[in-house]
Image (cartoon, grey):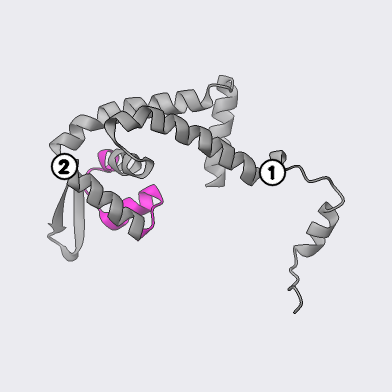
Amino acid sequence: MSVPTFKADAAVDDAAAEPYVLEQQIGHLLRKAHQRASAQFLAHMDAIGLTPTQYAALVKIGDVGETSQNHLGRLTAMDPATSQGVIRRLQARGLIELRPDPDDRRRTLLRLSEAGRQLLPRAIARGRVVTRETLAPLAPGEQATLLALLQRLT
């Protein structure tokens, strides 16, 4: 059985002459940066019991107000299965409320509950600390550059 060839194989062959250093590869560096950010997130959000996806959903519902589950998933880059689990857990904690969309019975609308509105400012304050501490090794200009470049990649 032969290995299929791809158009990029020529570039791969050219690059093979260069030494490959794992610590200089984008995927490896992004994974390590993600580990750093995740550790900071856990250190600050564990006390209020929010996961990264729950935090993203809570903040985004706070930003846009009442929204559909589908729209929330698109805004937070969550697939439908993940979004459903996040919504179920936030509802079980009493942080969001669900109601049928009066204009489309197939759709459910989500909004922050009173408990969610009370928790949101504390969660956002902790989120700011997570960002600040994650980016702490960088100078302010480097922080802005990194964030701008990551936004271009997404």
- Chain part drawn in magenta: 61-80
* Residue in the picture at 34% in, 59% down: 81
Where's residue 83, x and y in %?
A: 32, 54
Question: Dot 1: what SS?
Answer: loop
Q: Seen in the image, is 144 located left or right of residue 20?
A: left
Give the residue type at disc 1. Gln
* Residue in the picture at 35% in, 55% down: 82
Give the residue type at disc 2. Gly
Q: Quadrant of residue 25?
A: top right
* Residue in the picture at 76% in, 77% down: 2
Is residue 71 covered in magenta?
yes
Q: Earlier in the sequence, mark 2 or mark 1?
A: 1
Q: CA distance from mark 2 to mark 1?
A: 43 Å
* Residue in the picture at 60% in, 25% down: 142
Q: Which mark is residue 94?
A: 2
Above or below residue 110? Residue 51 is above
- Which residue is labeled 1 in the image? 25
87 vs 72, nearest the viewer: 87
Q: Seen in the image, is 20 located left or right of residue 17?
A: left
Above or below residue 117? Residue 27 is below
Above or below residue 16? Residue 152 is above
